[in-house]
Image (tube, rainbow, N blue to C red):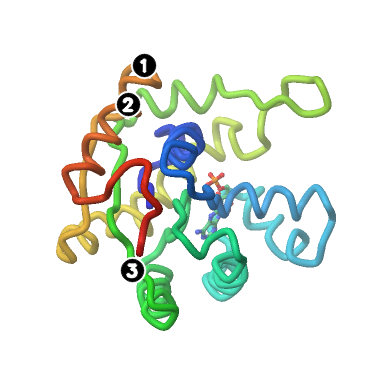
Amino acid sequence: MLLGPPGAGKGTQAQIIAARLSVPAISTGDIFRANVSGKTELGQQAKTYMDAGDLVPDAITVAMVSDRLAEPDAKAGFLLDGFPRTIAQAEQLRDSLAEMGHRLDCVLELVVDQDELVRRLSGRRMLVDGEWVQRDDDKPETVRHRLDVYREQTAPLSGFYEQAGLLARIDAIGEIDEVTERAMAALEASGEQPGAPAGG
Ligand code: AMP
């Protein structure tokens, strides 16, 4: 799983690392955004929280992830991006993975200082229908709030996974491929074998 504040590059690295490991990247932010665009009931429930830069309640998020992890492509392993984000989510994930006979192999924390995060997030644009647009939650006031939410609710996961002996911290400043190489080296050092299905 990838842990790190908004703007640390989790989404970018998740795509690359998941492809290298031949496992799906499961991003709760992407699943929520797809539901918001598709105007599903889940999307409607999540939208107000997302627009405000707050976390979607644990019950909604955990149920969504459980459904996703039950899909066949996640059987041989997966890379989580943006989940868990609270200690309660982490505890529920640990319990439901145990029930499924799975476990987390490694938690990679992408470390980036606050100034760099603000710079990255305020400049970030997404391509939507051929046009570069700013995510609503990348507006400066929402960015500041999301970083506060990270510090208060998600940063404690670093200690949680360190205690569980699963945490590897990597410097996430630099070129994308440099960060990927650091991530792959940390995964290898943790005993995870790049290129082989995870979890088995
Ligand atoms: P992200 O793309 O990971 O930055 O997620 C965008 C937004 O989706 C977050 O600001 C939250 O509102 C919501 N979200 C994504 N993942 C979670 C999660 N694990 N728990 C609660 N809310 C989440």
Callout 3: SS: loop
What residue did someone put label 2 on?
A: 179
Query: Outermost residue, bottom direction?
Result: 99
- Nearest the camera: 38 or 187? 187
Residue 158 lies in quadrant: bottom left
What residue did someone put label 3 on?
A: 103
Residue 10 lies in quadrant: top left
Task: Indicate which disc, 2 or 3, sits on the residue closer to the N terminus.
Answer: 3
In the image, what residue type sits under mark 3?
Arg
Query: Outermost residue, front direction?
Result: 196
Callout 2: SS: helix
**Drawn side of residue 87 relative to residue 45, left or right:** left
What residue did someone put label 1 on?
A: 175
Residue at 48 percent across and 44 percent down: it is: 22
- Nearest the camera: 95 or 159? 95
Determine whether 75 is above or below 51 in the image.
below
For marks 1 and 3, give the one nearer the viewer: 3
Residue at mark 2: C-beta within 8 A of ligand 1: no
Is mark 1 in CB contact (under 8 Å) with mark 3? no
Is mark 2 in CB contact (under 8 Å) with mark 1? yes
Residue 126 lies in quadrant: top right
Residue at mark 1: C-beta within 8 A of ligand 1: no
Mark 1, Cα crowd under 10 Å, few <14 / some 14-19 / many 20+, is: few
Residue at 38 percent across and 80 percent down: it is: 95
Determine whether 188 is above or below 91 in the image.
above
Q: Position of residue 3 (x, y in %)?
A: 36, 48
**Drawn side of residue 24 relative to residue 190, left or right:** right
Task: Indicate which disc, 1 or 3, sits on the residue closer to the N terminus.
Answer: 3
Is mark 2 in CB contact (under 8 Å) with mark 3? no
Q: Position of residue 128 (x, y in %)?
A: 77, 29
**Residue at mark 1 to residue at mark 3: CA–CA distance:** 31 Å
